[in-house]
Amino acid sequence: MAYSKFLTAAVSAVVLVAATGAGFAQDLRKITFAQPSASAINSFPVYIAIGEGYFADEGLEVQVETVNGSGSVLQALAAGQADFGRPGPGPLLTARSRGVDAVFIYNVAARANFGIMVEEDSPFQTPADLADKVIGTGTADGAEVGFARNVMSGAGMVPGKDFKMMTVGDGGPATAAFLRGDISAYSASVADAAVLVQRGVPLRDITPAEFARFFGNGLVTMNETIQQDPALVEGFVRAFMKGQIFAMDEANREASLDHFAAGFPQEIEDRDFASALFTAVRSKSIPLEEDKGLGYLPPAVWDEWQASLIANGDLAAPLDDLSAAFTNDFVSKISAELN
């Protein structure tokens, strides 16, 4: 499927969204999905799959729990407080190095979901220009941290030596950090950047183009779940992929926004802004290798992610078996089934 043709374009809180649609039944199995930020748009396939009844068709009722960053998502998975989550690849690999047997099963942000952003009128043009400067991040251990270190490493720069990183939060706190001059750049997701622009801080992305292949957050579950309940994983992935396919059809834009409003009404108060944000987030979910289908995880980029984490000191050594950190088994099967 040529997905590009469809493109025109914290904090702990629990949101329980009732499953709707033709497949609803009283005996649905209740499961928990943990997301790293309070946003329906960032987790758009989940909210669409809830609203369209795709999870209910699989016999599932999904409770969405919002936590603070990828590290907290992985903690929730490891503690059995969530069945699925959406952390970044960097945090997943560092967690696996500590013995957390979590596995990536779906590439949601198939193109880099983050960028090194500077104020539009700043003199900074490349990451190398940020020597001796401070880069802000939303969380201390989220996917945006590993991405920023990766980009800066590509410019030959070492954190703590050639530049500094500071956790400043997102939204209002990040805006204030820019305005006070606390930070010269911000490692931001497309959603973070859109919020800052809305708050009066026009931004410019100085991330080199080659970093687009460094995919961002994706679906993760524990290996124990894969081994003991593969039908659950397959059902969740199938519903999720249906939600993403629905979102790719421009004819479904308003219905998608309605589903987001059901999950996070405050996020859709400015519907025009929410629609523009949805376009930006959706664009990052289109695979670079479209022939591989939605959700495909390129093994070569996992190698690059691991190498960058080692270079930046986030991993002391290569994992014993990097291939155990991810699987394309579910997305390959379901892609063939749905397409």
Image (spheres, grey):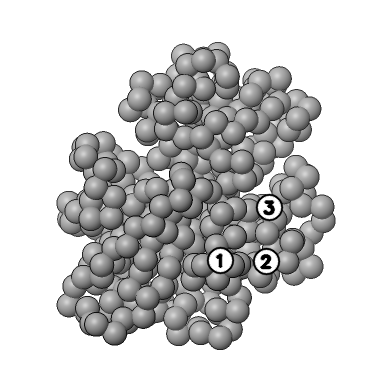
Q: Is 266 positioned to the left or the right of 320 in the image?
A: left
Identify the disc placed on residue 100. Answer: 2
For the residue carrying disc 3, how many other residues have a C-alpha within 10 Å: few (<14), some (14-19), or many (20+)?
Answer: some
Q: Residue drawn 53% across and 37% down?
A: 138
For the residue carrying disc 2, how many other residues have a C-alpha within 10 Å: few (<14), some (14-19), or many (20+)?
Answer: some
Q: Please name the amino acid that badge 1 sits on.
A: Leu
Give the labeled residue for mark 3. 304
Q: Residue 95 is drawn in which quadrant?
A: bottom right
For the residue carrying disc 1, how many other residues have a C-alpha within 10 Å: few (<14), some (14-19), or many (20+)?
Answer: many
Marks 3 and 2 in Cβ contact (< 8 Å): no
Q: Element type at marker 3? A: helix
Marks 2 and 1 in Cβ contact (< 8 Å): yes
Whichever of labels 2 and 1 marks the residue nearer the N terminus, that label is: 1
Q: Is residue 75 above or below residue 235?
A: above
Q: Please name the amino acid that badge 3 sits on.
A: Glu
Question: CA–CA distance between discs 2 and 1?
Answer: 9 Å
Q: Residue drawn 63% across and 63% down?
A: 299
Q: Is residue 133 above or below residue 278?
A: above
